[in-house]
């Protein structure tokens, strides 16, 4: 058997690319580092592949629409400026987020902060001190109450009664934000749609609950969650192709994927799924949950093309996203990408 030409050819093909033993030099750039990752193994190779796939999305002549899903404690981890830069620099076309991320962005825009904390702490004592904890991060609970109250009062004074998609509501909520590092400000100024399909499951929802209670007997602002679906499908239907960048999983990942299904089922489109897909997350597929589900599984549902360019990075986002963004930020070709002008 070892003399069989087919056997030898298969062996040679599988053993032709050695693993790179990385060498760090003192003037190495992030782009060079991530390039080196591509020839390494385990999650380093996945990061390198994800960076290159995102770059392919941004330089594809077909001009795919790029959706970015955001979930997890990304602002608490310190990623807010990177996320807003991604929007300012036109690296994505639409954003789907959890309510917590958008709320914490608003908290920062109003002067709030996260602080160094510890996981070894008396949480009962923190409760007595009105300090909240997100893993090893502390926050001032009184500022959360103040921001909840701001959502209530701002909605009352500045947003006309009516049915709003979460995108419409968030654009209205963002009008007075001046903080250039704000994700909401970046979306507002660049006309980048941002959806929060589970907006009631957040502190924004808490603020809106107070607003609803105060206005339940008169015309009021109402969040129409199915309108989110319709607006998202309109983006898909008007796209030649699409790509998905998932930072975390959860509702944003499912919402972006389901837009393909809705386009096909509700509107008779013949979409093959996302052409590109990358995810940075610690979620794993073995529990059967959506957050860790593979792109192969998404292909079975028609959400991601069978031949899509894809990479799953099993790494916590506070490490993975800065590396990928650092790789992309040094590419001058990205700045030539046209910005979409959405009309809803």
Image (cartoon, rainbow, N blue to C red):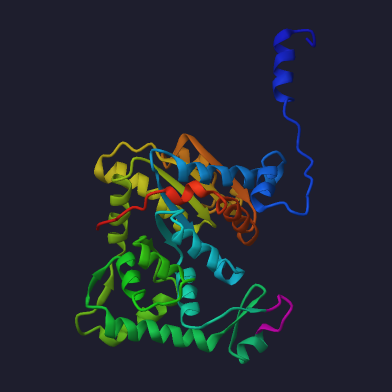
Q: Is residue 286 visible?
A: no
Q: Which residues are magenta?
A: 117-123
Give me the residue at 58% from left, 47% from top: 51
- 323 drawn magenta: no
Q: Quadrant of the C terminus?
A: bottom left
Q: Quadrant of the N terminus?
A: top right
Q: Report whether 60 appears left or right of 82.
A: left
Give me the residue at 46% from left, 82% from top: 110
Q: Work out whether 53 lies above or below 84.
A: above
Residue 243, x across and y down, in percent: 44, 45
Q: Is residue 48 visible?
A: yes
Q: Report whether 152 appears left or right of 42.
A: left
Q: Report whether 87 appears left or right of 127.
A: left
- 122 drawn magenta: yes
Q: Residue furthest left?
A: 219
Residue 99, x across and y down, in percent: 44, 69
Q: Nearer the viewer, residue 281 or 242?
A: 242
Which SS does the magenta portion mostly show?
loop
Quadrant housing residue 133: bottom right
Count all numbered tags in the image, as a single digit.
0
Q: Nearer the viewer, residue 250 or 13?
A: 13
Q: Work out whether 185 lies above or below 266.
A: below
Residue 263, x across and y down, in percent: 30, 45
Q: Work out whether 286 lies above or below 309.
A: below
Q: Work out whether 15 lies above or below 256.
A: above
Residue 189, x across and y down, in percent: 36, 67
Q: Nearer the viewer, residue 31 or 212?
A: 31
Q: Report whether 286 appears left or right of 242.
A: right
Give me the residue at 39% from left, 69% from top: 199
């Amino acid at each position: 058997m070892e003399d069989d030409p087919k056997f030898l050819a298969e062996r040679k093909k599988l053993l032709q690319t050695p693993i790179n033993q990385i060498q760090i030099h003192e003037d190495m750039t992030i782009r060079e580092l991530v390039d080196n990752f591509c020839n390494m193994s385990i999650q380093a190779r996945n990061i390198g592949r994800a960076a290159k796939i995102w770059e392919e999305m941004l330089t594809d002549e077909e001009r795919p629409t790029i959706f970015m899903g955001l979930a997890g404690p990304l602002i608490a981890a310190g990623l807010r400026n990177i996320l807003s830069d991604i929007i300012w620099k036109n690296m994505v076309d639409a954003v789907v987020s959890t309510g917590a991320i958008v709320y914490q962005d608003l908290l920062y825009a109003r002067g709030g902060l996260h602080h160094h904390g510890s996981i070894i702490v008396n949480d009962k004592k923190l409760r007595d001190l009105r300090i909240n904890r997100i893993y090893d991060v502390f926050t001032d609970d009184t500022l959360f109450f103040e921001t909840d109250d701001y959502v209530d009062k701002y909605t009352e004074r500045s947003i006309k009664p009516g049915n709003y998609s979460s995108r419409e509501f968030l654009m209205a909520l963002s009008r007075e934000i001046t903080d250039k590092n704000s994700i909401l400000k970046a979306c507002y100024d660049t006309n980048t749609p941002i959806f929060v399909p589970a907006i009631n499951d957040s502190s924004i929802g808490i603020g809106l609950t107070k607003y609803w209670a105060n206005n339940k007997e008169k015309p009021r602002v109402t969040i129409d969650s199915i309108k989110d679906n319709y607006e998202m499908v309109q983006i898909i239907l008007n796209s030649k192709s699409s790509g998905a960048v998932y930072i975390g999983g959860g509702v944003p990942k499912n919402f972006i994927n389901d837009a393909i299904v809705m386009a096909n089922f509700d509107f008779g489109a013949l979409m093959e799924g996302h052409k590109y897909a990358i995810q940075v997350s610690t979620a794993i597929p073995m529990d059967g949950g959506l957050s860790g589900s593979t792109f192969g599984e998404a292909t079975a549902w028609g959400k991601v093309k069978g031949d899509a360019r894809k990479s799953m990075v099993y790494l916590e986002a506070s490490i993975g996203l800065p590396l990928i963004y650092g790789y992309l930020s040094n590419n001058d070709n990205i700045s030539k990408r046209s910005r979409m002008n959405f009309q809803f």
